[in-house]
Structures are given as C-alpha cells and as structure tokens.
Image (spheres, rainbow, N blue to C red):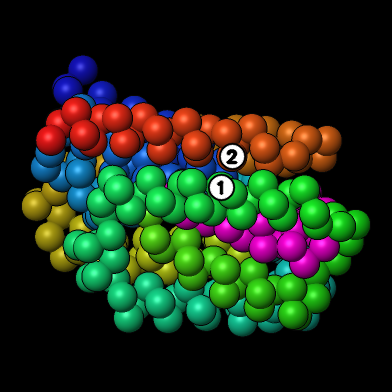
Amino acid sequence: MDQEIQRSIILGIVQGLTEFFPVSSTAHLILFPWFFGWHGEIDSLTFDVALHGGTLLALLVCFYKDWLELLTKERQKLCYILAAIVPAGAVGILFKSFIEHQLRNPLIMVATLIGFGAVMLAVEKHSAKNRESVSFRDAMFIGVAQALALIPGVSRSGITITAGLFRGLSRESAARFSFLLSTPVIAGATLLECRKLIKSPEAYNLDMFTAGFLAAFVSGFFAIKFLLAYLRKNPLNVFVYYRFALAAVIVAAYFRMQ
C-alpha cells in the first residue's frame, strides 16, 4: 500500500476518534505529522477538512432520525441550532487565515489542552446535570463556546459538552446537542474547502483524500456510539487526564527537538 494512503488512513482513524472524544481532533491532526515528520498535502488544512467530511457523514448516519424530527416536528429546536452556529461561523470566516497560520503551534495546544481540561474538570464536579431539554439560552451559550473550538487544542465536543453541563444539562443531552450543533458547522467548513478540490482536482491526491475520508467515517461512527453510551454513566474525567498527559508529551517532544 502506498505510504501516503497508509498515513491518510491513520489520520482518518485519529480524526474519527478525536472529533467526538473531548480531546481536540485539530490538535491531533497537527501533532501526528509534526511528531513523525510528515509533510505535504497530508499536513494541510484542506486534508484536515476532507477528514472532517468523513466525520460529517458519521454524524448524519448516526443522527438522521434526529434531523428528520428537527425538520418536520421540532422546528423550534432547529431554530436554536441555526442561531447557535452563527458565532462559530462568524469567527471562522473572519479569522480563518490567522487561525490557520498563527495558531497551529504546539505550545498553544499545550496551553489549551491544560486550560480547558481544567475547566472541564471544574464544571463536571460542580454542575447540576439534571435537565434534558435545551432552551434558547442554553443553545446560544453553547454556540458561543463552540467558537472557541477553532483554537487548536480546545476540542469542539469538549467545549460544547462542558458548556451544556455548565447550563445544567445531563451529560448525554449535552453530548447529543453538541453533535447536532457541530453538524452544520462541519458541513459548512467542508463545503468551503471542497471548492478547491472541485476547481483543481488534479492538484490533489484524491486516492489519499478518499482513504482518509472513509477511515474517518468508520472510526467516527463507532466513536459517537461509544461516547453516548459512556456518558450515560461516566464523567468526562478520563478524557481530561488524557489531555493533561498529551500536553506533557508535547512539551517533552518540543524541547527535545529544539
């Protein structure tokens, strides 16, 4: 098997797992090429977004019944979701270049992995976690929090689930709303980057992109199923400890390479 295909499959699996686990998929997609010295298309934002396309498909497959309900019966909740995606969409459009070129830095990820990990621990410990329904205020609070996930190391699922817990939602309700909220955001980012592929397909290794897309879809599907079941009975703590351990590994690797 071609080396680039192998690497794309590895990163697809990493993306599928870390997109939904609250440990930051963006950080992992930056760190794997950095650790192993992978360069070229595989270490680009366009390839990252192609992998996000795979996790988008996983979301649609897992939550298609929810989206049918939103489109036909729960239109108020659909409006909440559409309103809540505005903050992340606006920040993404306004600061796309800055985020892509200035924030993909290992030490920034160390700070966000630790800082937002500590926030997750605090909210997990002190929040009520006794509500199932999402209000408009809940949705907007979670939507504003989602905008912070554009910073590598924060984690979209981590910050939105944590925001839901802060508002008193149960873990499973917070996670389910987090996944529904992420769907249009990931779809928008994927469509924007897909324009490059459509305009100049010859400029990209489409076999590599396809392999990564499929790997992200399969691993993402199982990650969603696992996390929803896990959060019915368990706190977020294990993911926070993983974030702290990952930050320590990054610091050690960074200074070793200097």
Point 66% across, 56% down: residue: 162
Disc 2: which residue: 240
Residue 60 on image: x %, y %: 58, 53
Point 67% across, 63% down: residue: 163
Q: Is residue 171 magenta?
A: yes
Residue 25 on image: x %, y %: 43, 45
User: Mark 2, residues whose alpha carbon is within 10 Å: few (<14), some, or many (≥20)?
Assistant: many
Q: Is residue 163 magenta?
A: yes
Disc 1: which residue: 117
Q: Which mark is residue 196?
A: none
**Front residue (pair 41, 232):** 232
Which stretch did the figure color magenta? 153-174
Residue 136 on image: x %, y %: 75, 80
Distance from disc 1 to disc 2, alpha carbons, whole Å, reads: 5 Å
Look at the image and tell me in which quarter the C terminus lies: top left
Left or right relative to 245: residue 136: right
> What secondary structure characterizes most of the magenta part?
helix
Q: Is residue 218 visible?
A: no
